[in-house]
Image (spheres, rainbow, N blue to C red):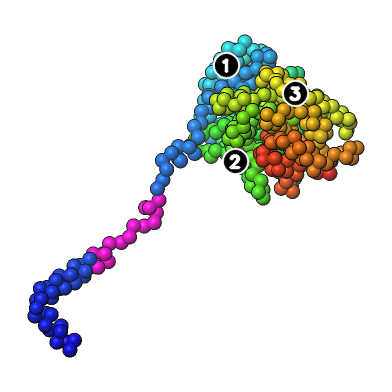
Amino acid sequence: MTFVKRVLVCKLHPKIWIYCLCAMCVLIGTLQATAQVRPPRRKHRILVDPSAKKQDTLKADIGASLKDIVKRATRHPQNSKVDVVFIVDGNKRMLASIAMLEKKLIDMLAVIEAKTMDYRFALVGFQSVQGEPNYTFYHWAFDHLSIENALQEVRAEFDNRVQPGYGLDAIVKGLNELDFREGVTTQFIVISNSRMRTVWTQADAKRRISEQIVNLCQQNSVQLNFIGTSEQIQAELTERTSGKWYPIDSNQQRIDGQRIQRGDIVADKALLRVDGLFKRIAENLVSHRPDKVDIVFVFDYSVSMETKTDAACDGLDQMVAVFSETGLDYRFGMIRFWASVGGGESTIVITKPPLEPEQVKAMFRLPKIGDEHLLDAIMEGVPKLRTSPERDLVLVIVTDESTSKRTEKDYTAGKAIAVCRGARARVYVIGGVTSVRSGSFGDSFQRQVAQLTKGEHYIMPGSIIADERR
């Protein structure tokens, strides 16, 4: 019966067969064409952001780097003197860089002389000759021509025997053999296209000599600047001495602003500058849209902070700029704290808001010789602020050391955190490091008080690695 119906249908609709045959031909042709076309390879599907390469490309300019260094050194009018020490790698691949350094010295000098400042220059050249360290030492001179002549002598020694030298030892040599003027922050400028090395053969030699360099810089008010390569030790030394790193050529990778993850804490590695942290705190604070806010700095007033005060003052200017741009109603206050060396009684000075920015900067610049006890400052200082209910309270802890543990008073991290929370304070911390070996970036109190009050925690560039048993 079904067959008969099909025959009848075909007789009644003869065009159906034609339509079916056409459709099959089209289908077969499509399948053949598809089989011959290969799908595009995956890599051709990747879209590249043309701005990404531009962001990662560093512009290397020795002249601009030199000018930036002396601009930072001469920006404060109360400083009438500037001393500059060049630590120059004399290896054979540095010929063009040293020639550029000679050419750009006059631009650097113009910045200094525009401020009518008293200046001195010195130079330590370093290289390796047949595997042996060789140093060229030029003591203080009062004109740039002496340094140009010294650089020409370094270039005159270029030959195939000369290899990259021991830069870390050259820095130590300069720190040990030069005399330093009181009240002057000396700028060391290390210029090299090679990695920093040392002749020391002990285990962990680079870390050991780096600690010696940092200690000598702090003792003599020296800031280390590198026009160099993208090397971790260069970044750490510049950061810990409040200096700055610049690329010697455009092949270098950006090494500032890197971050490290420790559990659920994201801490800025000690590569960011102090002023950048102040700005970041300001940006985070305004993102919470406070109505009226009192910003009180809990400021470590011990002498180890002296090398960081200039950067803190610059950071305060950046903070004010952020607040002014957003129209924030803010007032500044200050809790300064220090103690006698060896665990003496704390001195805590509370200055309630309002303070003008220039008053805050003046207080930053007067560190005391001694120790510090952060918990004392929190426990005894914060309750005395008595912030009015219509204003939010923000505490900005600024210290380069870890929180000391005292047995004389029954002050604990938990009690100090409770005081901050009882004052309804949001706490930001630019703080110290307890132990890099244990992977503890910032001690538990400083991390936790920021976390529990919805603030942020950062590592102070140049923070002192403290003994956890303290």
Q: Residues within 10 Å of mark 3 (few under 14, many from 20)?
A: some
Residue at 66% across, 20% down: 357
The answer to whether 1 appears left or right of 208 in the picture is left
Q: Quadrant of residue 34?
A: bottom left
Q: Which residues are magenta?
A: 31-46
The answer to whether 8 appears left or right of 178 in the picture is left
Q: Is residue 42 visible?
A: yes
Q: Quadrant of the N terminus?
A: bottom left
Badge 2 or badge 3: first in the primary sequence = 2
| Residue 258's disc number | 2
x and y, in percent, of residue 274 in the image? 65, 31
Q: Is residue 166 visible?
A: no
Disc 1 versus disc 2: distance between alpha carbons? 31 Å
Say which amino acid is labelled 2.
Answer: Gln
Say which amino acid is labelled 1.
Answer: Val
Disc 2 versus disc 3: distance between alpha carbons? 36 Å
Q: Which residue is mark 3?
A: 352
Q: Which residue is mark 1?
A: 111
Q: Residues within 10 Å of mark 1 (few under 14, many from 20)?
A: some
